[in-house]
Amino acid sequence: MKPPRAPRSGAPSAAVSGHVRIIGGRWRGSKLPVTDLAGLRPSADRVRETLFNWLMPHLPGAVVLDAFAGSGALGLEAVSRGAARAVLVERDSQAVRALQASAARLDTDGQVRVIADDVLRWLATAHAESFDLVFLDPPFAASAWDHALAALAPRLAPGAWVYLESPVTLEPAVPQGWVLHREGRTRDVRYALYRASAGQGADTLRDDSNEPASA
């Protein structure tokens, strides 16, 4: 879960409240700093491990967007496990500096791009790049799922995968034609993986499963 955040121009280097670890792939075990921002809580290890078990057949070669990136744990994990590249969008300046430091330390060789911007504004103005996989975990208090899903639609490759985290009591309304592939819940969080409609862009990921299932 990620809190509402505003850019902080001229702010000092971010204090670090803790770390999360990349779970698998070439950067397995690498620590990612979690900046000391009120309410910031990266996706739990158990949730991330479950998610990437779902995604493993579909990661090789994927182009990934980690919206509301926070610590970058989702986007960086995807590249660690074989995604071709990832764009990490984050508007808090302290978190951006931490993301840039993580990307430099991991020596991502140009596979990771950190964007310092509000993700809704960036999606509205970005070039025509399309994404095979999107991680969407907006600030819970901001209720940004509807706006973010609408902004994402033109940027999705056909049949793209979209991962959503939301409060356990909230199931965001997804666009018509999307299929729930997997979902799970913790005490506080609902996490779900959707397959988007195949009506846009170039299809780079394929799924051989026939029916959605629950975790």
Image: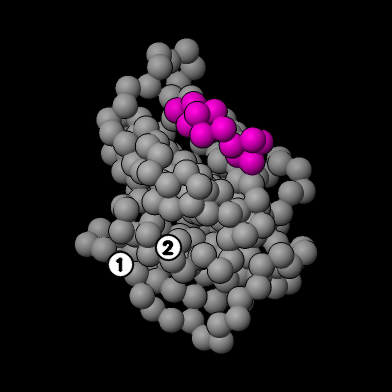
What amino acid is at disc 1? Arg
Which residue appears farthest toward the left when viewing the image?
187
What is the distance, in whole Å, between disc 1 and disc 2 at their CAs? Answer: 12 Å
Look at the image and give the residue range highlighted in magenta: 98-112
Side of 13 where 19 appears, left or right: left
Side of 177 where 6 appears, left or right: left
Tell me the residue at 37%/59% (across/down): 49
- Tell me where residue 132 appears, x and y as whole percent: 64, 59
Q: Which mark is residue 53?
A: none
- Res 2 visible: no
Side of 1 where 213 appears, left or right: right
Q: Decide which of 126, 87 is in the foreground and name it.
A: 87
Residue neighbourhood size for the residue with mark 1, other residues' Cα within 10 Å, grouped as few (<14), some (14–19), many (≥20): some
- Tell me where residue 81 appears, x and y as whole percent: 52, 54
Helix, strand or loop at disc 2? helix
Q: Which mark is residue 51?
A: 2
Q: Which residue is mark 1?
A: 185
Tell me the residue at 36%/75% (across/down): 215
Q: Decide which of 93, 169 is in the foreground and name it.
A: 93
